Image: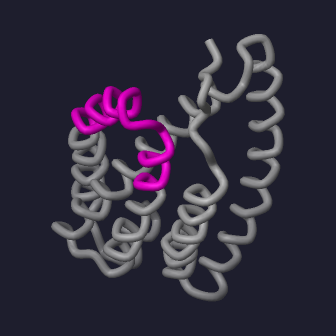
Amino acid sequence: MVYATSILKMSLTQWAIVVAFRYLTIAVPAIIAGFSMDVLGRKRFLILGYLLYVPGMLLFINANFDQLILAFFFFGLGNILQLNSYMVLMGDLIPRKLRGTAKGCLQFFMFIAQAIFQTIIGVLYAFVSPQLPFLILATSAIPISIFVFWRVYEPIVKEA
């Protein structure tokens, strides 16, 4: 919001429209993707979710209002695909009786990492370039997608 209103010069009303549009436009694709994950597998949607961050963030960097709507559609769809496929894949891989423990451990380390990285990203935003955090997200999505492609496997037997 800070970047959109201060750097891109969007009004608060425009920003509210963009955010509302993001959630409204990803609702139907999210349901379709959820059904498709059960048929086509989770890995494809995880990779697609990460890759959609690339056009979303690259458009966001210098967007006008119309481009911002498109950027947030890509970002929102990528986010919902990535999060849903990740959660379903974890459910497929982790035995039911260990899911709470595994999820708690994953969240613990994820929150620690987020605190560290958000501090670093905040410093980069404030003292290096406001565009840099968005470029980092766009460029990091590609190696993460490659890693998922090569190292993440759909389970043959899914946990119940």
Which residue extends farthest front? 156
Q: Is residue 29 magenta?
A: yes
Which image quarter holds the C terminus?
top right
In the image, taking residue 129 as reference, residue 124 lies left or right, namely right
> Residue 126, how many percent across, how many down?
63, 79
Q: Quadrant of residue 9?
A: bottom left
> Residue 25, how many percent across, how many down?
21, 43
Q: Is residue 101 above or below residue 37?
A: above
Q: Nearer the viewer, residue 98 or 10?
A: 98
Q: Quadrant of residue 95?
A: top right
Q: How is the image coloured?
A: one colour
Q: Residue at x 74, y 71 (%)?
A: 120
Instruction: Label the magenta part by its dominant secondary structure.
Output: helix
Q: Residue at x 29, y 29 (%)?
A: 31
Q: Is residue 139 magenta?
A: no
Q: Quadrant of residue 27?
A: top left
> Residue 140, how many percent across, how many down?
58, 71
Q: Residue at x 26, y 32 (%)?
A: 32
Q: Is residue 119 above or below residue 87?
A: below
Q: Nearer the viewer, residue 146 or 118?
A: 146
Q: Residue at x 54, y 69 (%)?
A: 137
User: How many numbered marks appear?
Assistant: 0
Which image quarter holds the N terminus?
bottom left
Specify the segment rendered in magenta.
27-49
Which residue extends farthest left? 66
Q: Nearer the viewer, residue 31 or 150?
A: 150
Q: Is residue 105 above or below residue 149?
A: above
> Residue 11, how many percent across, how many down?
26, 63
